[in-house]
């Protein structure tokens, strides 16, 4: 009787664990999903954004900036992004404190959406987006971006996938995914005590993409091609 009970409990635990592993790692009911489902790069207009999100906190024209609130992009990364950065030809709509975001920036070129920046409030623990779920969430592969060699192009990164070999993750790192129509740049905050000591001791971890999304950019490749 006791052995049967133990066997039953073990079976239940295994089943529960298997179910948990097959669950979608990122909730589909986030504000981020709402924006990306309703607003499309190269298609949506400022009017579409206002209809969906309401009146923005800021509505102005500026140049194209890859800096982000957290300084996501280094100068070397700009080697693979060719855009009309110095032209104040981009209409920017800025929304603050919507959903799980700290703010959302939408940039339009010639009346079409070409750039989206999500800045997240990581203080809302229940709404954090785990980085490991990004490939499944968007159906694309990501690579860790550390250095960009001179002469590199976006095409060099298209279709690339990070290997699963255990590695040391920095407390802040960047993910890149280059698709035919868009580019994903993601800043990941992996800054907890465990990650800090692993990084300090150069101790690799088997977990892919630990940490939470702090900042995410989506950029239209049509925009980069116009600048070439």
Image: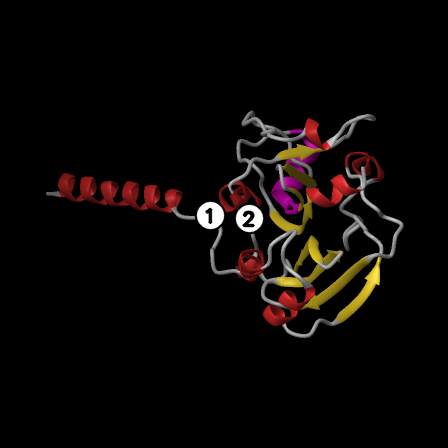
- Work out whether 128 lies above or below 149: below
Q: Are marks 1 and 2 in contact (CB under 8 Å)?
A: yes
Q: Residue visible at 64% across and 31% down?
A: 158
Task: Name the foreground residue: 217 vs 90.
Answer: 90
Q: Residue visible at 33% across and 45% down?
A: 19
The N terminus appears in which quarter of the rendering?
top left
Percent x, y of residue 89: 83, 56
Residue 212 inside the magenta-drawn segment: no
Percent x, y of residue 136: 49, 42
Q: Residue visible at 71% across and 71% down?
A: 56
Percent x, y of residue 118: 66, 56
Task: Name the foreground residue: 85 vs 95.
Answer: 85
Disc 2, SS:
loop
166 displayed left or right of 56 = left
Residue farthest toward the bottom in the current orientation of the protein:
55
Residue 196 inside the magenta-drawn segment: yes
* Magenta-highlighted residues: 188-202
- Work out whether 205 lies above or below 120: above
Percent x, y of residue 72: 76, 46
Q: According to the image, label 1 marks what residue? A: 25
Distance, label 1 to label 2, CA atoms, is 8 Å
Residue farthest toward the right in the current orientation of the protein:
86
Task: Name the foreground residue: 104 vs 14.
Answer: 104
Labelled disc at residue 130? 2
94 displayed left or right of 130 = right
- Work out whether 118 lies above or below 22: below
Q: Quadrant of residue 140?
A: top right
Q: For the residue carrying disc 1, how many other residues have a C-alpha within 10 Å: few (<14), some (14-19), or many (20+)? A: some
């Amino acid at each position: 009787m006791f052995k049967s009970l133990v066997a039953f409990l073990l079976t239940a635990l295994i089943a529960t664990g298997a179910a948990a592993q097959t669950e979608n790692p990122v909730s589909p009911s986030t504000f981020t999903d709402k924006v990306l489902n309703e607003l499309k790069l190269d298609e949506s207009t400022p009017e579409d954004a206002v209809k969906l999100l309401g009146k923005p906190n800021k509505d102005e024209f500026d140049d194209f900036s890859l800096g982000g609130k957290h300084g996501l992009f280094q100068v070397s990364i700009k080697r693979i992004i060719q855009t009309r950065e110095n032209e104040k030809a981009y209409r920017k709509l800025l929304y603050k404190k919507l959903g799980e975001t700290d703010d959302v920036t939408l940039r339009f070129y010639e009346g079409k959406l070409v750039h989206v920046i999500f800045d997240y409030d990581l203080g809302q623990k229940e709404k954090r987006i785990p980085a490991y779920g990004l490939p499944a969430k968007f159906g694309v592969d990501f690579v860790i971006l550390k250095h960009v060699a001179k002469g590199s192009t976006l095409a060099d990164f298209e279709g690339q996938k990070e290997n699963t070999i255990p590695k040391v993750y920095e407390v802040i790192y960047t993910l890149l995914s280059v698709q035919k129509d868009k580019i994903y740049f993601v800043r990941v905050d992996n800054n907890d005590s465990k990650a800090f000591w692993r990084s300090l001791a150069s101790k690799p971890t088997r977990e892919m993409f630990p940490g939470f999304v702090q900042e995410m950019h989506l950029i239209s490749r049509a925009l980069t091609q116009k600048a070439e």
